[in-house]
Image (cartoon, rainbow, N blue to C red):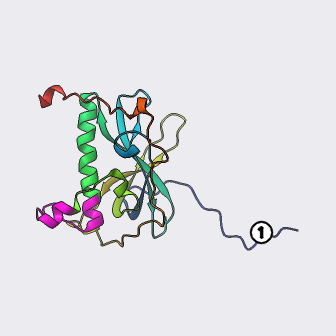
């Protein structure tokens, strides 16, 4: 006889409510493209993005996940705009993780906003605001990262940085054919 009367209650997989502030840990999901193989190339080959898995670290929603794909490079004007938005998002994540106010222009603050590789984001913890993307077609609603919460905001608090025991590394360098970077042309508005 198997007795499940002492098993815990079933977990709900409803989306985390929009506006929830949470401590998040980043896992960079290597895509075998771009510099050092950290980026993921779009199926059509026109852009590359940074694929991040975000895990809630503490609280009621601990161990729940959401994902974000940040466009880093591409061939169109839209890709260029998306890359600018992605750069701003990465900056805010670094500021949140390292306790740097956005208006701090000191050398220490500039240093905190620098990384040597996208792999440096792996294991980084920061405070983020979670949102909900509505259901589309056959796909249910899902959680998204609305924004990183920086130290100038009342919802921010310092987080302990805990590097994973084995930091992720790209499984394999891109093959020579896919190693060529996406050819980026300046959009008309930037010329």
Where residue 75 sits in the image (x, y, percent)? Answer: 28, 28
Where residue 189 sits in the image (x, y, percent)? Answer: 14, 29
Pick the quarter of the image with the C terminus. Answer: top left
Which quadrant of the view contains residue 182? top left
Q: Nearer the viewer, residue 15 or 94?
A: 94
> Can I make out residue 31 in this image?
yes
- Please say whether residue 104 is one of the residues in the magenta stretch: yes
Q: Residue at x 52, y 43 (%)?
A: 140
> Can I make out residue 19 in this image?
no
Q: How many marks?
A: 1
Q: Nearer the viewer, residue 28 or 143?
A: 28
Where residue 6 sits in the image (x, y, percent)? Answer: 73, 74
Pick the quarter of the image with the N terminus. Answer: bottom right
Secondary structure category for the residue under label 1: loop
Question: Which residue sits furthest right?
Answer: 1
Which quadrant of the view contains residue 158? bottom left
Taking the image as shown, residue 68 lies to the left or right of residue 171, namely left
With respect to residue 58, does 110 lie above or below?
above
Taking the image as shown, residue 99 lies to the left or right of residue 164, namely left
Q: Residue at x 25, y 30 (%)?
A: 184
- The residue indicated by pointer 1 is 4
Which quadrant of the view contains residue 22? bottom left
Q: Residue at x 27, y 38 (%)?
A: 82
Q: Residues within 10 Å of mark 1 (few under 14, many from 20)?
A: few
- Please say whether residue 42 is one of the residues in the magenta stretch: no
Q: Which residues are magenta?
A: 94-111
Q: Nearer the viewer, residue 8 or 103?
A: 103
Where residue 37 sits in the image (x, y, percent)? Answer: 40, 44
């Amino acid at each position: 006889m198997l007795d499940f009367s002492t098993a815990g209650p079933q977990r709900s997989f409803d989306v985390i409510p929009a506006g929830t502030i949470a401590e998040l840990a980043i896992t960079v999901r290597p895509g075998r493209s771009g510099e050092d193989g950290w980026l993921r190339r779009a199926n059509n080959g026109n852009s590359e993005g940074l694929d991040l898995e975000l895990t809630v670290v503490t609280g009621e929603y601990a161990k729940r996940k959401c994902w974000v794909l940040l466009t880093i490079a591409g061939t169109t004007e839209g890709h260029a705009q998306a890359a600018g938005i992605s750069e701003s998002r990465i900056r805010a994540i670094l500021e949140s993780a390292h306790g740097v106010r956005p208006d701090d222009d000191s050398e220490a603050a500039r240093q905190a906003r620098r990384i040597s590789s996208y792999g440096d984001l792996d294991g980084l913890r920061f405070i983020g605001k979670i949102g909900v993307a509505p259901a589309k077609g056959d796909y249910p609603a899902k959680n998204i990262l609305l924004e990183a919460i920086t130290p100038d905001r009342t919802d921010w608090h310092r987080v302990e940085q805990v590097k994973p025991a084995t930091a992720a590394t790209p499984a394999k360098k891109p093959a020579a054919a896919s190693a060529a970077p996406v050819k980026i042309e300046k959009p008309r508005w930037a010329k």
